[in-house]
């Protein structure tokens, strides 16, 4: 345990966290400033064809550049606009009207530096870097909105990525992300469909005051590494009323490094009223070195996801993760419902304590309330390290039906209140090297 944190998560602490989040999210929503609607830059007026065959990159980029000079709206009317990578400007609203599709090219050289070839990537000689399809850095008041679609044309990229993964288990072939916006203050993404990214779909990085609302994100369930929303090193983020059906994490909060001037790289993040279908669930990690705190997941449905609630980070890539509140969650046919582990990607059956370092995961103050789940296999795991037990976990009004157990290991200050785990075989809750209250009839051992 670090910093003298209590093992318990009192209601007053959870309430204080909730109140702080409500204030921060109100500020986040209020901070969104729509672009000056009197300045509209229609990409057709700049020469875009919108026929799905001609390259419209130059016309769209010219409209974006003109808009950034004064602020305003770049309008994309109905049609299919084929484009190479684009760069957003400050005080810009990208409006994709219903019936409009902004479609990425799938030619690797469009996303790579001139001195790097796609064969270099396939041979493992280079990792890129790849440009995202839509990028932008050091901006303010950016909006992507409307009833249209941003399509990453990922099919061509997924085939070699899967081939590479099969050769080396867990290997991620470098590919472009679809939307990466870095150091943006006041970012709003709403009412659009984002689909078929070569890799991650929407990555706000080092952003403050982000609202992602009523967004649909789609990719085939077998498309490797197609995370939907990855708030990285970002603060005051609201993800609400989104439908996500992808091949990797539905949401993944990442803090892969420290951010100067901050105790926690990621904080004050709320995910509410979302539906997650295929994907790897609501995740924190696996990079948590920079620290993550004050995360709320509320009123969400999981349908057929590979994981439900998941915190994952291994030694060397870990840091503090604290104050996670999950409430009013339903899960159908997930696998498993709860995964909180300081090992990744694999959990060993046995382990010896190691020295605590700056990269040691430390998970604490986690509250899961009003969760109902059916699981295909295990109910879940809560597994810390021998040198860094998970602490201060409360499960309250939790009902999980699964084939096998909920395993709790290397944890302390775990409190179960009205928890029922129904399994078809073995003990429903198994505890090893852990301090757990509220476990009538559980099996305890070392």
Image (spheres, helix red, strand yellow):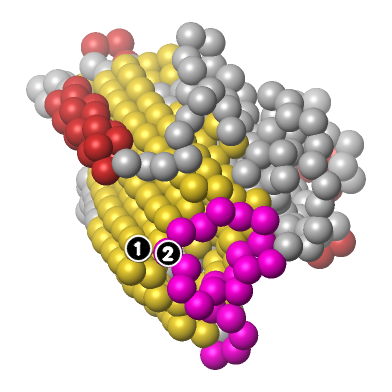
| Circle 1: element type | strand
| Circle 2: element type | loop
Tell me which numbered mark, 1 or 2, is placed earlier along the sequence.
Answer: 1
Residue 438 is labelled as: 2
Residue at point 80%, 26% (across, down): 115
Q: Position of residue 279 (x, y in %)?
A: 51, 63
Q: Left of 263 or right of it: where is 243? A: left
Could you give the CA–CA distance between mark 1 and mark 2, rounded to whole angstroms?
6 Å
Q: Position of residue 426 (x, y in %)?
A: 62, 85
Which residue bears the numbered disc 1?
A: 417
Residue at point 53%, 23% (across, down): 3
Tell me if residue 431 can be seen: yes
Tell me where residue 348 sits by quadrant. bottom right
Q: Position of residue 435 (x, y in %)?
A: 56, 54
Q: Left of 22 or right of it: where is 163? A: right
Q: Which residues are magenta?
A: 424-445
Mark 1 or 2: in front is 2
């Amino acid at each position: 345990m670090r910093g003298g944190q209590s093992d318990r998560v009192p209601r007053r602490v959870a309430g204080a966290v909730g109140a702080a989040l409500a204030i921060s999210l109100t500020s986040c929503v209020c901070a969104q400033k729509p672009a000056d609607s009197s300045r509209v830059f229609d990409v057709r007026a700049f020469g875009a064809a919108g026929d799905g065959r001609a390259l419209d990159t130059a016309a769209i980029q010219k409209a974006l550049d003109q808009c950034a000079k004064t602020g305003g709206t770049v309008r994309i009317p109905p049609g299919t606009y084929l484009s190479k990578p684009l760069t957003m400007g400050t005080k810009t609203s990208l409006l994709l009207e219903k019936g409009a599709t902004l479609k990425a090219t799938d030619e690797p050289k469009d996303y790579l530096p001139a001195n790097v070839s796609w064969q270099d990537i396939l041979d493992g000689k280079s990792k890129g870097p790849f440009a995202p399809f839509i990028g932008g850095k050091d901006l303010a008041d950016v909006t992507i909105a409307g009833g249209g679609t941003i399509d990453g044309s990922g099919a061509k990229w997924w085939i070699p990525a899967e081939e590479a993964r099969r050769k080396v288990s867990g290997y991620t072939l470098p590919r472009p992300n679809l939307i990466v916006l870095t150091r943006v203050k006041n970012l709003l993404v709403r009412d659009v469909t984002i689909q078929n990214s070569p890799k991650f779909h929407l990555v706000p990085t080092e952003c403050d005051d982000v609202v992602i609302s009523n967004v649909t994100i789609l990719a085939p369930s077998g498309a490797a590494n197609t995370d939907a929303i990855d708030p990285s090193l970002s603060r005051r983020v609201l993800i609400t009323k989104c439908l996500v059906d992808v091949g990797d994490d539905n949401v993944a909060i990442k803090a892969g490094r420290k951010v100067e001037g901050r105790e926690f790289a990621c904080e004050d993040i709320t995910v509410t009223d979302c539906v997650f279908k295929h994907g790897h669930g609501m995740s924190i990690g696996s990079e948590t070195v920079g620290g993550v705190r004050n995360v709320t997941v509320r009123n969400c449905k999981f349908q057929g996801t590979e994981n439900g609630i998941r915190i994952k980070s291994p030694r060397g890539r870990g840091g503090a993760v604290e104050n996670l509140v999950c409430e009013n969650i339903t899960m159908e046919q997930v696998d498993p419902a709860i995964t909180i582990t300081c090992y990744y990607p694999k959990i060993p059956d046995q382990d010896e304590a190691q020295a605590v370092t700056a990269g040691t995961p430390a998970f604490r103050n986690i509250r899961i309330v009003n969760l109902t789940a059916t699981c295909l296999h295990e109910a879940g795991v809560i597994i810390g390290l021998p040198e860094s037990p998970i602490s201060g976990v409360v499960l309250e009004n939790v009902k999980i039906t699964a084939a096998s157990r909920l395993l709790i290991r290397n944890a302390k200050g775990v409190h179960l209140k009205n928890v029922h785990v129904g399994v078809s075989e073995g003990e429903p809750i198994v505890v090893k090297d852990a301090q757990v209250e509220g476990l009538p009839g559980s099996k305890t051992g070392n």
